Amino acid sequence: MNAALPLDAAPLTASGQSHPHESATAQIAGAATYIDDIPEVRGTLYAAPVLSRLAHGKLLGVDTQAALALPGVYAVLLAADVPGSPMLAAFAGDEPVFARDTVQHVGQVIGLVVADSVMLARRAARLVAPHIEPLPAILDVRAALQSQSFVLPPVTVRRGDAAQALARAPHSLQGTLEVGGQEHFYLEGQVAYALPQEQDQWLVYSSTQHPGEVQHWVAHALGLDNHAVTVQCRRMGGGFGGKETQAGHLAVWAALAAHRVKRPVKLRLDRDDDFMVTGKRHPFSYDYHVGFDDHGRLCGLQLQMLAHCGFSADLSGPVADRAIFHADNAYFLQDVEITSYRCKLNTQSHTAFRGFGGPQGMIITEAILGDIARHLGLDPLAVRQRNLYSDDAGEGPRNTTHYGMQVEGNILQPLISQLARTAEYPQRRAAIARWNKNSAVIKRGIALTPVKFGISFTATLFNQAGALVHVYLDGSVTVNHGGTEMGQGLHTKVGQIVADELGVPLHRVRLSASDTSKIPNASATAASAGTDLNGRAAQFAARHVRDNLAAFVSGLDGVGAGAVQFAGGQVMTPKATRSFNAVVALAYANRIQLWSDGFYRTPKIHYDKTTLTGRPFYYFAYGAACTEVAIDTLTGESRVLKVDILHDVGRSINPAIDIGQIEGGFVQGMGWLTSEELVWNAQGLLSTHAPSTYKIPTSGDVPAHFRVDLWPEPNPEDNVFGSKAVGEPPFMLAISVFEALREAVAQARGDGQAVQLNAPATAERVLWALRT
């Protein structure tokens, strides 16, 4: 690579290619190590949680005698046994390590049993008898709103005068929508393994998206400084946001147990307990009043969002904020008023999940536009296109969001037009109309919906990353960075970036486990920013090493450093060509530094969290999906028939991994909106707490026609390799499934009325919508 060329401008060899995932071979062979696979130290004990069976009540005492009487049970831990703070180190400070004076949801952890086997610990935990005096529980979000039960204060964002715009609008609609939550259902459940070390130090293996936060939480609970705790994570078996904060609970509990018994302790939740203890995607309830003209263009919108937060704040604040940010999705909202209530309920504390409030913001606007189209007798795609953000100066500025950020690099119109053409949307819509006319029972629907998703943490301080690059004497390379690998291919992409920066083959670069003793204060691997942040930091670290070598070689050959090129495992100047390995050995002999650190912080972003205005995102990722569905009007059953996707990943670092993320994100989003139903009963018990009652999509739900194409243009912002984030945006492409189902219901009813279909659109709900 030519050291004088600008960032990312030189020809590359590893990036842009579909290399296999760096752990694929090991995973296929069963040789990839997860937390529960780590060989256990002799003397390891096992913990299991003691759970509340009531949704709300006063905790009067806990009888542990029956559990402690079992041979092999070593201890039962309760709130009084926490040596540090009794509250978790979450930003709101509102969640106890163990329930103290009250229990606030079915499944809240009251304590831990520690025993010499996993099954004994779980059996003993069920013998612990908490004495709880029942209190009234709030399980309905409307009741929470009425009683002003909030985990955080409400937030309102306004632009223009929505009330006046509604009064002037030629047409208006009012309605409600209920959208359910979603269980993360990671293949590897929540797990942590805590090992006491010398001099009151701790090593914690945690399946976590945020090792730095786990380190802080464990130290806080033990009453130690952060440097006394090291957290490591080589890989997770899935995360999806569910291991961003809530992995910290497991690590804290395991460390507290190990502190109590002075031995290593492992804590792994079984699937039922994982469902009962951990939070989900936030369910949302909406009330809206929308005004529009004869062509379906929005005139004014009043929108109320009720976020079902559970019993504590967790990440509900930023999730609900992002829902506000993404209520526009791809559309210009001129006169708008959005009020967000963060409602406290006696359920699990809901948390991050892929999209982080973005899906909950987008889906309501897509539903509104679909209803507007049906009210006016128009094609929903035409209504959507009329409302898109636009740089057309002829009709005035329509390129600024309701929170004051200019929409730059907007490719929505050409991207949607291209997908409509390649997916043959007009022809298929006409064919579906003919089908529905002749089919009495099976009705079809089609929808094409866009996505505009902002990339960056909305909390500006988290948009930073660090990395280390070590070059060894044989020319091999190890990279360590603050991101975590959960199957999404982050380590693979970072390895490709470093390989190109040093001009070596990809197989010469290896990624090591995420480790708080190597990269401190790292942000969570979340917000789709893992590669943007950590890839750039690793690139900068590799660049420092390369510059050291270039300066050394230029001195040997009497040329400028800019004339030294690194490519194909060779180091070339106009006077000589040497192998990279030979240059490294020679540089070491001359005491040239062969390792370096790199640091990156995202430019341009700023955000006022008190007014929710500014530029919270570095750029937007765009995409669109065209989905065709069929419903059985006698049973309410539905099936996705065809999916066509055109998605914007910029200049792809690894097309195979990016397409895999798009496919997986879409199917996961499809599950959220069709089959994955969370049901709490009247006592606050989550009834759907196992695969027998909670249905994620299977391979049989994926349509045979599932086409994914990548938009060919690079990111106009100066991002690593010209790429764009791909983790979360494709999830929201699945809103096209929900809109296609609503269109099929409308076609079956044929009355032109708004479709009252809540999500997930289970067979029961589809049948209800057909008959309402």
Image (cartoon, helix red, strand yellow):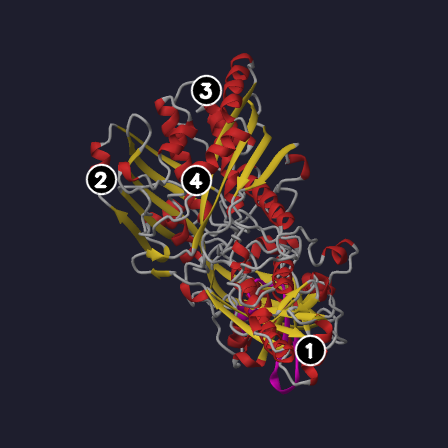
In the image, residue 500 sits, relative to residue 72, either above or below, namely above
Farthest top residue?
438
Q: CA distance from mark 2 to mark 1?
A: 64 Å
Q: Quadrant of residue 559?
A: bottom right
Q: CA distance from mark 3 to mark 2?
A: 32 Å
Residue 133: percent from left, percent from top: 47, 59
Q: Quadrant of residue 273?
A: bottom right
| Labels 2 & 1 near each other (Cβ < 8 A) | no
Q: Name the amino acid, label 2.
A: Ala
Q: Observer-nearest residue: 285 or 380?
A: 380
Q: Name the amino acid, label 3.
A: Arg
Residue denoted by label 2: 163
| Residue 344 visible at all | no
| Labels 2 & 4 near each other (Cβ < 8 A) | no
Q: Within the magenta stretch, is there residue 440?
A: no
Secondary structure beneath disc 1?
loop
